[in-house]
Image (cartoon, helix red, strand yellow):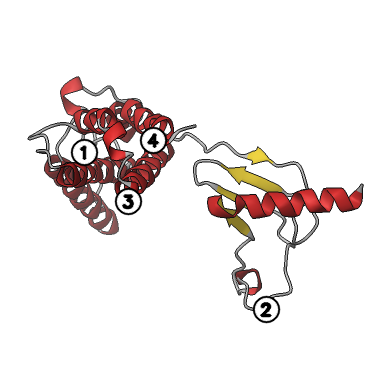
Amino acid sequence: MTYVEKTYSRLDSLRSQVPLLPDAMIPGTPRRWVERDLSASELARQAVEVREDRVDRVENSAKGLKPTGNSKAPLNLGVLDAQVDITVSIRELEEAVCDRLGITPLAGASAIDRITRIIALLSRIAVDDELAEHVLAEGTRLERRARQALGDDEPVYKIKGRCPVCDSVSLRAFPDRQVVVCVNSQCVCDDLMCLCHATKPIRHRWIHDQWDVLNNEISAEERNAA
């Protein structure tokens, strides 16, 4: 898969998820279309109102006071935070792309419009290695953030072959994060400085740049076992 194809896949997925976030903020409550492209300032204002409302409810509860009438539906702050992050980050990403390419950012555009513009510029972005890496990293991060906010789980793939550390068939690939992890909680190496020996152990993992090395180690183990 080429850089353009890979980055397009991330950004196009993000573009399709952005309109779903407002509905996810209040489960079961329909949202008007005009609320789907809120500005960052409007989202921030909503977040402040929700937090103030939460404080009021906690204080009233402590005093033994209960609200009268119909109360507002609870707002999912995790989804709201994700939408604010995506809206702001996409604007900053488009500004970075435009600055590097010498073009003018869109004025007053929605996150979807900015994503669409970045997609249209991918062939030019790909020529600049540093910019290309930044766009792919941000696209991947924001797409994952949106998917998690919407409750979509990241796919996990079982890898054939044994972990080169513990010899257990416990390697799992997380393609969105581009990492392979040994899920065996007993996987401990001989390096006492390794984080697998920490008070809160971190499992052995191999990032994308280390996959070739991992593959060679797995292949060598399979040849020796044959």
The disc, 3 or 2, on the residue closer to the chain's N-terminal end is: 3
Q: Amino acid at mark 4?
A: Thr
Marks 1 and 3 close (CB-CB < 8 Å):
no
In this rendering, which labeled residue sits more in front, label 1 or label 4?
A: 4
Image point 28% across, 22% down: which residue? 30
Q: Which residue is mark 4?
A: 7
Numbered disc 3: secondary structure = helix
Q: Badge 1: few (under 14), some or many (20 or more) residues near its Cα, within 10 Å? A: few
Q: Is residue 163 left or right of residue 48?
A: right
The picture places residue 158, in percent across and down from the top left corner, at 69, 40
Residue 6 in the image: above or below residue 67 = above
The disc, 1 or 3, on the residue closer to the chain's N-terminal end is: 1
Marks 1 and 2, how far apart at CA: 60 Å
Q: Badge 4: few (under 14), some or many (20 or more) residues near its Cα, within 10 Å? A: many
Q: Amino acid at mark 3?
A: Glu
The picture places residue 106, in percent across and down from the top left corner, at 11, 34
Q: Amino acid at mark 2?
A: Leu
Image point 75% across, 58% down: which residue? 164
Q: Badge 2: few (under 14), some or many (20 or more) residues near its Cα, within 10 Å? A: few
The disc, 1 or 2, on the residue closer to the chain's N-terminal end is: 1
Q: Which residue is mark 1?
A: 68
Tell me where residue 149 sits by quadrant. Answer: top left
Marks 4 and 2, how far apart at CA: 39 Å
Tell me where residue 98 sits by quadrant. Answer: top left
Q: Which residue is mark 2?
A: 192
Numbered disc 1: secondary structure = loop
Identify the mark at residue 130; answer none if there is no mark: 3
Marks 3 and 2, how far apart at CA: 36 Å
Residue 4 in the image: above or below residue 169 = above
